[in-house]
Amino acid sequence: MAEQKRHDPEDGTKGPLDLMPLFAKELVAGGLAGGFAKTVVAPLERVKILFQTRRAEFQSTGLIGSAVRIAKTEGLLGFYRGNGASVARIIPYAAIHYTSYEEYRRLIIQTFPDVWKGPTLDLVAGSLSGGTAVLFTYPLDLTRTKLAYQIVSPTKLGASGMVNNEQVYRGITDCLTRTYREGGIRGLYRGVAPTLVGIFPYAGLKFYFYEEMKRHVPEEYNKSIMAKLTCGSVAGLLGQTFTYPLEVVRRQMQIQKLQPSDNAELKGTLKSILLIAQRQGWKQLFSGLSINYIKVVPSSAIGFTVYDTMKLYLRVPSREKTAVEN
């Protein structure tokens, strides 16, 4: 029986993976990493958003009580309400985030070869890539938050789309369409300012801590899944802690139009922080942080690990080799 012909990198032939452009491989790796990580932690993300936006209804019941309420009200699928929008957002977001990080990193090295080296490089490239990804995908993040804010099944909706005087959306397309009709482009980007203010330090610190921790991993453990999981966990944990109040502001700005009209309108990041602290207390700025810790550890760990693993599978060259070729 003739032996099946396989791709051999030493004989000069190229397989499908070798024909893929570098940026395409990074896009695929980043998109898969983001989508997989987000789906794993979707139930915790749903509870966290309700903690951030429905303070009186959910904080008093705690994590377990909130989970029980969602299960009774909406069933198991209730934990994944808004996850379709979340995954639809996170796949392009993560793809752009990881790919632009690599591109910014290469660009900075080429532009400032004798200056930008070491952890500062990861901090700057991570910050810029985070801002880039947010600007491209923010309307889907807004949609995810509005859908997760709902605690009524869309099947119970009347023709008006209202339940208990609250606006309820039937899905991603319905939410995007109606949000645009109500506020135009500005409506689709409501809350983007605190998001950008928060993502610059968060994304920068996340990449900084991850790459810095990997530099201290012994060489024999560089490809270890556990080492990557550990580095990703700590990186996400530290990055989130410093920027969490800005996420609370963003969530409350996103669902502002869905709340009673007598609530004070949130305008401007700093003013919104002060208003939330004044009206709801300083603790509200950290509402859901404990849940976020539980969520961010596996999310960051899985995201970074899947990304690095996919880069190996797709035969993405090392950064050092890429820098030399350029």
Image (cartoon, rainbow, N blue to C red):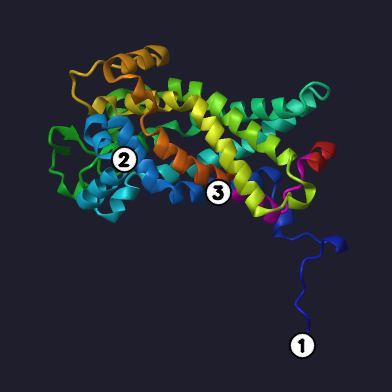
Nearest to N terminus: mark 3 or mark 2? 2
Q: Which residues are magenta?
A: 305-319
Q: Is 118 placed above or below 155 here?
A: above
Nearest to N terminus: mark 3 or mark 1? 1
Q: Residue at x 41, y 36 (%)?
A: 290
Residue 181 on image: x %, y %: 28, 28
Q: Is residue 62 left or right of residue 120?
A: left
Give the alpha-carbon distance from disc 3 to disc 2, as whole Å: 23 Å
Q: Is 75 placed above or below 44 here?
A: below
Q: Amino acid at mark 3?
A: Ile
Q: Which residue is mark 1?
A: 1
Q: Which mark is residue 299?
A: none
Badge 1 marks a residue whose secondary structure is loop
Q: Which residue is mark 2?
A: 148
Front-most of residues 179 and 83 = 83
Give the alpha-carbon distance from disc 3 to disc 1, as whole Å: 43 Å
Q: Residue furthest right?
A: 11
Residue 54 on image: x %, y %: 26, 32
> Would you say residue 274 sits in the magenta stretch?
no
Front-most of residues 316 and 277 = 277
Mark 2 Cα within 10 Å, few/some/many (few <14, many 20+)? many
Badge 3 marks a residue whose secondary structure is helix
Q: Which residue is mark 3?
A: 302
Q: Is 189 placed above or below 145 here?
A: above
